[in-house]
Image (cartoon, grey):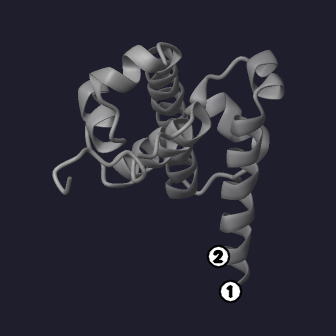
Amino acid sequence: MENCLSTTGIYYKDIKEYKTDINAVIESMIANKERLVFSVVAEKASITPFVIRQYPDLRNYILQTMVNYKEIQVLKEKIEKAAASLAKSNKNLTFLAIINKCKFDSNMVYQNQYIKEKIRSIIAEQNQRSSL
């Protein structure tokens, strides 16, 4: 009787928990400057082929999340590079100066909340540095 299979210790995550794990893995990979690859993200988030068969939406979620994070990373780098270039050339660091330096479309900027927040945070950071 001791060799019987015990099913009391088995716990399956729901799709929300897997999505949270995926986001955490992708964020840590970006922070460590690792390359985002589907198989690596799935492995680090403990997503097996069985889980993918159980929740087929996870495959699309991983791919879409990777694309979103890559786009955010590209925008972040572009904005930071433009701000550094403006500061180096002793030009005023303004919202419009950064937009023009990045060559963003004004409609895209005003519709994209991430770009607006990132530019504002860089300007606030620069103002704090200059006041010290």
In the rendered view, would you say 127 is above or below 27?
Answer: below
Residue at 48% in and 49% down: 24
Task: Look at mark 2 in the image and give the residue it sits on.
Answer: 129
Residue at the left extreme, as displayed: 3
Q: In the rendered view, does 75 fall on the left or right side of 66? A: right
Residue at 33% in and 41% down: 46
Task: Look at mark 1 in the image and give the residue it sits on.
Answer: 132
The numbered dot on residue 84 is: none
Residue at 19% in and 57% down: 2
Residue type of the residue flagged with mark 2:
Arg
User: CB atoms at circles 1 and 2 under 8 Å apart?
Assistant: yes
In the rendered view, would you say 131 is above or below 91?
Answer: below
Residue 97: x and y in percent read 71, 39
Residue 62 lies in quadrant: top left
Residue 59: x and y in percent read 43, 17
Q: In the rendered view, does 39 fall on the left or right side of 102? A: left
Residue type of the residue flagged with mark 1:
Leu
Residue at the bottom extreme, as displayed: 132
Residue 111: x and y in percent read 82, 23
Residue 28: x and y in percent read 40, 52
The number of numbered discs placed on residues in the rendered structure image is: 2
Q: Helix or strand or loop: what does disc 1 sit on?
A: loop
Label 1 and label 2: CA atoms lie apart by 5 Å
Q: In the rendered view, does 19 fall on the left or right side of 70? A: right
Estimate how packed mark 1 is, as few (under 14), some (14 to 19) or many (20 or more) residues with alpha carbons within 10 Å: few
Residue at 76% in and 39% down: 116
